Image: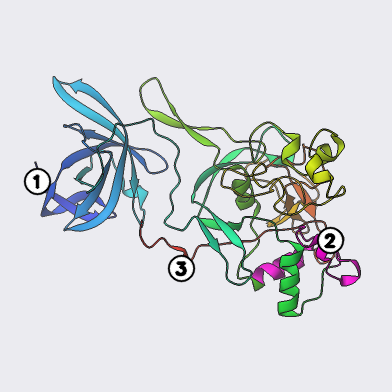
Amino acid sequence: MKIRIIIPFILISFFLTLTDSFSLEYDLAGKIESKRKDNIITVLFSALPERNEYLIINNDVILGKLKILKVNKYTINQKIQYRALAEYFIENQTPEILKAGTTIGLVKVEGKEEKEYGEPKYTEKSGYKNSIVSKKDNREMILIPEGKFVFGSNNGDKDEGPQQVVFLDNFYIDKYEVSNADYYYYVEQTNTKPPAFWINGKFNKDESSFPVLVSYKEAEKYAEWAGKRLPDEQEWEKAARGPGLEMAKKHNETFIYIENPVVYPWGNKFEIDKANSIEFWENRKTGNEIKKIYTKGLLPVDSFNNRNKSFYGIINMAGNACEWTSSWYNAYKESRHSNKKYGTQFKVIRGGAWFNNKYKLRTTSREIGGLPNLYEDNIAGFRCAKNPSMADKIVSE
């Protein structure tokens, strides 16, 4: 049964506040009780919601979507009420508009089945394709959806803290490190000088699948040619470790986010057979199928393909070749740690290399590159990032 109500409004985002009058038909009307972070709100209903997903409509225009995560029944003044924990989605968000007491009207999403309300989970949103292939260098990129994530660590070196929650917009990052073959294609296309890492400046076909080692400036130029950029260290770290956030229920039936980040791309425990590290080469019982083919050192960018994989499916972000980021080596926000090397001389390198131990392979470990300068130091490999474009949007779901 449709409920027809007359209420005053100003249309900002999809919420209704006081002014002129209008008439709409709703399946359900509710009042916002409280606003939480990450698009989470609590809404009071006089009737139990029949669906877990509703559209918010004004004048026959869809303004947003409300997903109900959890519903609790209780009684106030002998009247039954339903308190819902819900997540809202709108194209142009203005969360500061949300206020307790605002009334919203909801319409069922056609074709959606009725469902039981499960425990809410930390979610990230994106209207973009999960993966793309960049045109210039023909390399696969994976979407890292917008949202908050746990950045840094209080359990590592002093320059890794303090641990904090950071919001990042959507971005894409290369699934694999840039290989020698990838870089050779770039050299051929642009008539660029070969990297000093190549012996006598010659491309070695036997190492075509290995990550290329270049200076920061060479990596930056490649990224520019490919229509991309180098990731900053926050982007790199999120791609390597995931959001690190979970929802937890409190005693009063409300929910909060708790920080639960991982140490390595695959989890909290170091596993010798998952990364190209010094432990891998020194352990005689591990990786014999690889050691029969390759000598101690760099390995193909797709080595450990299904083992050294991050939360988002990015490969080899621990070990093999360490990777350039675009970030200057500086202290984090609210850090009290000082270092003479902070400033605009060194760039941050992430991920650790085949000659590093497990401590350097942690997702929060920071190293520096740029000695004697950013044009000559070819200590690291790299992967590229880019901001999503209109061409990357999902046309239909």
Q: Distance of mark 2 from mark 3, alpha carbons?
A: 36 Å
Q: CA distance from mark 2 to mark 1?
A: 69 Å
The picture places residue 247, in percent across and down from the top left corner, at 45, 32
Say which label, 2 or 3, has the lower sequence index: 2
Q: Residue at x 63, y 35 (%)?
A: 267
Give the mark nearer the N terminus: 2 vs 1: 1
Q: Quick check: 128 left or right of 222? A: left
Q: Nearer the viewer, mark 3 or mark 1?
A: 3
Q: Quadrant of residue 180?
A: bottom right
210 and 50: which one is in front?
210
Q: Looking at the image, what colour scheme do you see?
A: rainbow
Image vertical order of residue 106 relative to residue 208, above or below? above
**Label 3 environment density (alpha carbons within 10 Å; few <14, some 14–19, many ≥20):** few
State the mark number for residue 5: 1
Classed neighbour count for the residue bearing mark 1: other residues with Cα under 10 Å, few (<14), some (14–19), many (≥20)? few
Residue segment shown in magenta: 196-224
Q: Position of residue 135 (x, y in %)?
A: 57, 71
